[in-house]
Image: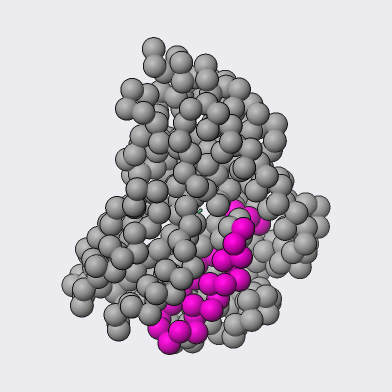
Amino acid sequence: MSHGFQHRSARAGALLGANESPFAPPAWIRMSVCREAGRLNRYPDPDCRPLRDALARQHDVPADHVVVGNGAAELLFALGSAVTDGDANYVFAWPSYYLYPRLAALRGAEPRAVPLDRDERHDLEAMLGAVDSRTRLLLVCDPNNPTGTAVAPAMLAHAVDRSPPGAVVALDEAYCEFNPNGQARRSIGLLGRGKDVVLLRTFSKAYGLAGARVGYALCSSRELAARLEAVRPPFAVGSTGQSAALAALGRQAEIEQRIARLERTREALTAGLLDLGLAPADSVANFAWTRLPETLADQDVVERLAARRVFVAAGSELCGINGLRITCGTPQERSRTLSALPAAMEEARG
Ligand SMILES: *Cc1c(COP(=O)(O)O)cnc(C)c1O
């Protein structure tokens, strides 16, 4: 399976295919990485101690409930292998993050994909209906990738309360910082409902550090955190990544400004897609998603856009749905995309 985008960092143009931040790391993050570079002959801190402590303070959770990983992707796989086995199944929505169906391959668990509803949101009632006594993991992507849609907070609490004993509810919150309803803070409350819950977060998206490879899990108990740690490779998070993430946490206000700029771009991008006669989903992430009519193959549109140096992701490659996922870049990149799209669609209709 592909990642749905090509790695194009070597090319000039608007790189809007991987939900990265358009902003290069600020000088104070680069300096902390440089300082760490002088110690690269040494192994990194295997416990990510200062970073875990800072995350624990930020979210007001005990430090031994925090697991830091080599991106949230590593923690997703750790979760898959820690809680499932060949007799188990796990439930997630579809279309959603391309890695979810692959978590099964590891331990032979059965993947159960439940379609999104008509508004391209998680259908949590249907997902709960797919749960049985062999379900070990209920995976909710909130906001969802690639649609950007969010789950109603009350529904999340309901799903946690209804989850069967022996199952872990995992919220993949890679984009939660972009959700204007304050879910990033509110979901911490889900950790205290007496169920096994994991919140997965990352420095790759809102914090703009995708190349540093740092993600983390907030777990509802020390035992659950220990189960994750037990299946992870040692020293998975490098020292430069740890220090970049720690530096970013130290200047939260500047990160918030960057998030606000991307939210404005998202609103303008969504409005622009509507003006073009498309039907974008109600995204609260750092990207827009729109399905395309059958007469318009997403890969053709993606190619025509690439010829204009605008690189976006084809839904057919991400999740088998004919559509476009367009990351919020700079305002310039947004207007470039919106002005390139009509001609690209026209040519693709051929
Ligand atoms: C980007 C992303 C991740 C993983 O990000 P990392 O770079 O591995 O931290 C996880 N889940 C979703 C839904 C994502 O979009």
Point out the stretch of residues depicted in magenta.
Answer: 180-207
How far from the left and from the top, in percent, is residue 10? 60, 33
Q: Taking 63 as reference, is 117 above or below it? A: above
Look at the image and tell me in which quarter the C terminus lies: top left
Q: Is residue 293 magenta?
A: no
Residue at x-position 33% and y-position 77%: 163
Q: Taking 228 as reference, is 17 above or below it? A: above
Colouring mode (rainbow / by chain / secondary structure / one colour)? one colour
Q: Is residue 182 magenta?
A: yes
Q: Which picture quadrant has residue 133?
A: bottom left
Q: Taking 253 as reference, is 46 above or below it? A: below
How far from the left and from the top, in percent, is residue 229? 46, 77
Q: Between residues 256 and 158, which one lies in front from this camera angle?
A: 158
Residue at x-position 40% and y-position 48%: 119
Q: Which picture quadrant has residue 167?
A: bottom left
Look at the image and tell me in which quarter the N terminus lies: top left
Numbered-mark total: 0
How far from the left and from the top, in percent, is residue 140? 40, 63
Q: Between residues 16 and 33, which one lies in front from this camera angle?
A: 16
Q: Taking 290 as reference, is 125 above or below it? A: below
Q: Residue furthest top?
A: 350
Residue at x-position 36% and y-position 28%: 293
On the rendered structure, is 294 left or right of 17? left
On the rendered structure, is 142 left or right of 249? left
How far from the left and from the top, in percent, is residue 205? 59, 53
Q: Between residues 29 and 263, which one lies in front from this camera angle?
A: 263
Q: Between residues 30 and 157, which one lies in front from this camera angle?
A: 157
Q: Judge whether residue 48 can be spotted in this image.
A: yes
Q: Judge whether residue 15 can be spotted in this image.
A: no
